[in-house]
Image: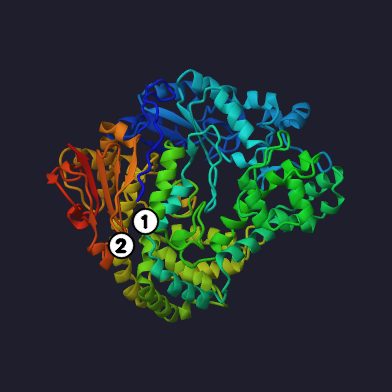
Amino acid sequence: MSEPVAEPVSDVDADGGRHRLLATYRLQLSPELDFAAVAELVPYLRDLGVSHLYLSPVLRAREASTHGYDQVDPTRVSDTLGGEEGLRALAAQGLGIVLDIVPNHMGTGEENPWWTDEARREQFFDLDAETGRWRRFFDVDDLAALRQEDDEVFETTHRKVLQLLADGVVAGVRVDHPDGLADPAGYLERLAAQGTGDVWIEKILHTGEVLRDWPVSGTVGYEFLNDVTALFVDPAGEAPLTELWHRISGDTRPFAEVAAEAELEQARTSFAPEVERLARVAAAEGLNDLADVELLSRAVAALPVYRTYVEPWSGTVDDGDRKALATADLPDDLARVLLLEEPGHDSFVTRFQQTTPAITAKGIEDTAFYRYLRLLALNDVGGDPGRFGLSVDAFHAGNAERARRFPRNLLISSTHDTKRSADVRARLGLLAGRAEEWRDHVQGWMTLTDDLVEGGAPDDAERYLVFQTLLGAWPIDEERLSTYLRKALREAKRTTSWIEPDESWEGRAIGFATALLGHRPFLDSFLPFAAEIGVEGERVALGQVLLKLTSPGVPDIYGGDELADLSLVDPDNRRPVDWEHRRRVLDNLAAGAEPEAATAKLWLIRAALALRARRTDAFEGAYRPLDAGPHVVAFARGDDEVLVVVPVRPDSAAAEAAVIAVPDGRWLNVLDGGEREVSGPEPWDDLVGGWGIGLYERT
């Protein structure tokens, strides 16, 4: 196997070396978790091993905002969160700060002085002069898109952030939804020219798509999330789980067809105003044959990626753009225009590229992911539920490519946007390795719970959603389950929807699910299986955490996820975190307490981040895969200074026979403190401890 090496990384970080970038910790700010409250967490996070706070948007948002993405004044830090004085005081506590910025849009309404100023409104916002409507963030009417291509708009909306960066208050930024901009590459180049340091972009890469050579530190990490999830999904389970899904749903289409249908639905309904505007732009530029709403609806729903990045102003067309447009199989005349083979249609090309990302996101992530339920572990942001599993070699290849091109790419496993937490996905992914057993359980539960179905609700596909949800999130209370299911049913848009809710159907479907929480015949079968999956899921989750903490890139920990987190989609994943409990756990471990199942994740994070701090150069250096067969991931970092061993399917016959050519020398077991001399190949299972993973430091 080849031995890819990471590009060298500067020893001095963007903020002058004040905060060496080891790991980030994502916090969703709110009136209850403001700057002062975060400052109280700094000692705990520092002891955990975190180097940087990774904050949700901090600029002034709507008064009642719960997330900050509806900013109304980007020139001021939010008073609700503590104001600029509070942010600067937080920065003085000793951890670096990464800010989430929102260049794509602002909140509408009286609180936004640019929105209420008619003269500036037309300059700042992407308005449709004919209808008076505006380009939206996705399908949210009260979030209006900004014209960052205008110099004054860029300067006004970035002045405060750039000042905070220049003053060393902030070390880097995460750019929200750059795909909505007219010129993402130009925007990022302009941002880099301002000396912004690290810039990570919320760019969703589809399977096989590569990040362009932009001046960024990388993406926010969804490609890693999906790779590390798929790594633990046994490909042997694909056929039986597919057959089970076909039988339950009555739908034999592959995911790609389900997604294509959902995207076209979105283009024809929620995004009809955007498509109609695109048709008017086509007509205005003399493209009368393309000024057809149905033709354009099919076209904007056909791309295999979020968008292309053709630049009419420079004539740039990348090979990735050509590939995407060829795969979309567009009408020849439309393809020629989009490839700039027929110049003079700059506005149409730009508008087309700004229209596709929202339709893709809403069609796939917020519709198809709730319809195609074969294995819910695979249904997450940036993922492809049609890709069943990932080989060890492919995982290594992804790591090696990241080490070469974007060694500071973020590595995530849970975020505020994920459909399920990493721990839930770890459990559900195990079903692929127990497919026949799972099939038998599902068939039995269908029979046991038939009497709970009322008037056809829930249908069999929805019942299958309930069974997987219970298994992944168990134990779960009635309120959380009800809130999740109402959202999931409406997102699927099959039997109810946000626009036309069928509250009667929802009530019966939710009643079915909550009845299971006390249904003794069901629980007698479900609980023993759930207990087994829960224990196995903890092993998988620890393996995935170790890979996140040691693979090329910068690991991020989502707020509270250092202990078991069985969260579902928001608002479930934005519940308050018990910080006092986490502080006590950390203190006990630091005092010598042995880790238990409930504390093992925090114990592992603390140990691995301490190693990253000791061996910074190793983690900024080479990544060398070590051959351990098809069911064990093993690699060395730096000059063979760190060794990582994570079995993917430890019970397989191939795994049992695998050995690893560990570099000769004396190695310290970072997790249990023991040392061993190695000279020659070692059985992989001799290198993992009671927690089923291995992490070593060469002495």
Q: Which quadrant holds the C terminus?
A: top left
Residue 27 in sight here: no
Q: Nearer the viewer, mark 1 or mark 2?
A: 1
Q: What amino acid is found at the position of numbered circle 2 in the picture?
A: Arg
**Residue assigned mark 2:** 649
Front residue of 619/78: it is: 619
Residue 294 position in % (x across, y down): 78, 58
> Is residue 646 or residue 28 the one in the foreground?
646
- Circle 1 residue: 392
Please name the residue shown 61% across and 55% down the image: 304
Q: How many marks?
A: 2
Q: Kindly give the residue lying farthest to the top in the view shown.
A: 167
Q: Residue at x 35, y 31 (%)?
A: 51
Q: Quadrant of residue 258?
A: bottom right
Residue at far front of view: 2
Which amino acid, by three-letter code, is at mark 1?
Val
Kind of element beneath mark 2 = loop
> Crowdedness of circle 1 by 10 Å Cα count: few (<14), some, many (20+)?
many
Q: CA distance from mark 1 to mark 2?
A: 11 Å
